[in-house]
């Protein structure tokens, strides 16, 4: 596909950075089934230093890590090593010991009881197991603030040993399920998640700058996390995920480049065929891209861990379901992306999409809190819209 993208997309990156307020820097890419159609970068890796954003900048991927974890889990399913509907405690025993929390007593003590159902790996992949995040759910936020529940970003095993918020399988709630899925993968393979990824995903996909622990060359190209202040200004922070985490968190723990992630997107665009060999069967890709929630829907996310709570919703309006393990848009989007496309995002305002129908995918990467930053998200929407406008023009008015 020959889309004239640079003249249209470069200005979007530039104005997102130079706007008042803007973002520190951004890297964005677009791919079709064969290779990248566009690679762009603008701004700086850290506002108070000289290093410019470049295409090979390393980002904390946060929740876009989940796409790698889901892919590795599906490989084990194909090999008959992982049963999605068996109790997950067969592979990660500690998950079978977690209680369910019903609230707090007058003294502030958690009211706990055993759950009535077992958690399965399918529930972990679909966010229906009963877990949450302390920055989205008030119960976990209270446990974090008053009971010492470690932050989900701490990299420690104790951060996963949380009570369930509801009966497994009862509803959709975004949380640490994919971190637990990483523990399931480790239990199946008998190796740390980073080693599993390196052997089963990174090597066959030609991925060289993605890992749970930063190498020297990766750190030299690292983008710094910034915080949006109440007045709209930006402040560089020194926050990083733990250098030597106790647990390789399958839900959020990877560092990597956008270029590496595009190779994973192409795996999904090409029905499981990687850069060097097939990693998943076409029928597995199709199954994973189907609605796994039935009539249940994915909604908004209340930000409880902020003085300025916000609701972040991905491309508001159309109804959304969940696959294994991606957001599925069930209606055409205003950007031009069709129904059935897959997507997700990361805490520092990173966003990707996979459009298997048109054979297009993209990734927009910033390093900025809080999540749902309107400047970064607005830039991403403009970016995606421009891609589909170019696609529409090339096809003579038929963008579908």
Image (cartoon, rainbow, N blue to C red):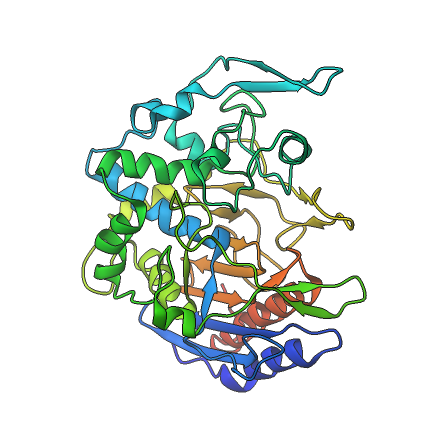
Q: Is residue 214 toward the left or the right of residue 399 in the image?
A: left
Q: Is residue 369 toward the left or the right of residue 119 in the image?
A: right
Query: At 37% across and 57% down in the image, what residue appears?
Result: 213
In the depicted view, which residue is nearer to us: 321 or 40? 40
In the depicted view, which residue is nearer to us: 368 or 3? 368
Q: Please count the marks in the image.
A: 0
Q: Where is residue 199 shown, x and y percent of the image?
A: 21, 53
In the depicted view, which residue is nearer to us: 191 or 207? 191
Any part of residue 342 in sight: no
Q: Where is residue 204 shown, x and y percent of the image?
A: 21, 60
Quarter in which the N terminus is drawn: bottom left
Q: Is residue 5 toward the left or the right of residue 226 in the image?
A: left
Any part of residue 241 in sight: yes
Q: Which residue is at the far bottom?
A: 7
Query: At 50% across and 84% down in the image, what residue appears?
Result: 6
Q: Is residue 239 above or below residue 311?
A: below
Query: At 63% across and 49% down in the image, what residue appears?
Result: 318
In the depicted view, which residue is nearer to us: 22 or 277? 22
Query: At 75% across and 63% down in the image, what residue appears?
Result: 229
Q: Is residue 323 above or below residue 36?
A: above
Q: Where is residue 298 shown, x and y percent of the image?
A: 59, 40
Q: Is residue 111 above or below residue 313?
A: above
Q: Where is residue 384 shown, x and y percent of the image?
A: 56, 68
Q: Is residue 150 toward the left or the right of residue 202 in the image?
A: right
């Amino acid at each position: 596909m020959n889309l004239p993208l640079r003249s249209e997309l470069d200005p979007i990156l530039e104005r997102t950075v130079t706007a008042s307020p803007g973002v520190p820097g951004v890297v964005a890419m677009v791919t079709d089934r064969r290779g990248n159609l566009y690679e762009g970068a603008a701004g700086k890796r850290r506002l108070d230093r000289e290093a410019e954003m470049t295409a090979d900048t390393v980002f904390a991927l946060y929740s876009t890590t989940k796409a790698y974890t889901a892919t590795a889990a599906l490989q084990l399913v194909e090999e008959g090593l992982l049963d999605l509907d068996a109790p997950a405690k067969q592979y990660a025993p500690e998950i079978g010991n977690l209680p369910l929390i019903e609230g707090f007593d007058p003294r502030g003590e958690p009211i706990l009881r055993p759950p009535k159902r077992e958690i399965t790996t399918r529930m972990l992949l679909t966010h229906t197991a009963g877990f949450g995040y302390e920055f989205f759910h008030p119960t976990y936020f209270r446990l974090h603030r008053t009971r010492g529940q470690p932050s989900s970003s701490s990299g420690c095993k104790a951060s996963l040993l949380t009570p369930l918020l509801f009966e497994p399988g009862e509803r959709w709630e975004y949380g640490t399920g994919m971190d637990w899925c990483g523990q399931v993968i480790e239990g199946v393979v008998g190796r740390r998640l980073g080693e599993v990824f390196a052997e089963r995903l990174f090597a066959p996909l030609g991925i060289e700058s993605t890992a749970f622990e930063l190498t020297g060359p990766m750190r030299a190209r690292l983008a710094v996390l910034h915080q949006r202040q109440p007045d709209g200004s930006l402040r560089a922070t020194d926050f990083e995920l733990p250098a030597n985490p106790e647990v390789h968190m399958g839900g959020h723990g990877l560092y990597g480049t956008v270029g590496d992630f595009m190779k994973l997107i192409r795996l999904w665009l090409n029905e499981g065929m990687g850069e060097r060999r097939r990693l998943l069967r076409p029928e597995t890709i199709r199954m994973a891209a189907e609605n796994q929630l039935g009539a249940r829907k994915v909604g908004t996310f209340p930000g409880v861990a902020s003085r300025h709570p916000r609701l972040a919703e991905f491309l508001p309006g159309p109804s959304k379901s969940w696959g294994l393990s991606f957001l599925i848009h069930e209606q055409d989007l205003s950007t031009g992306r069709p129904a059935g496309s897959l997507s997700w995002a990361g805490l520092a305002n990173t966003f990707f999409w996979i459009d298997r129908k048109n054979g297009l995918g993209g990734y927009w990467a910033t390093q900025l809190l809080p999540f749902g930053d309107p400047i970064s998200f607005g830039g991403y929407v403009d970016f995606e819209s421009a891609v589909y406008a170019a696609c529409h023009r090339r096809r003579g008015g038929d963008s579908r």
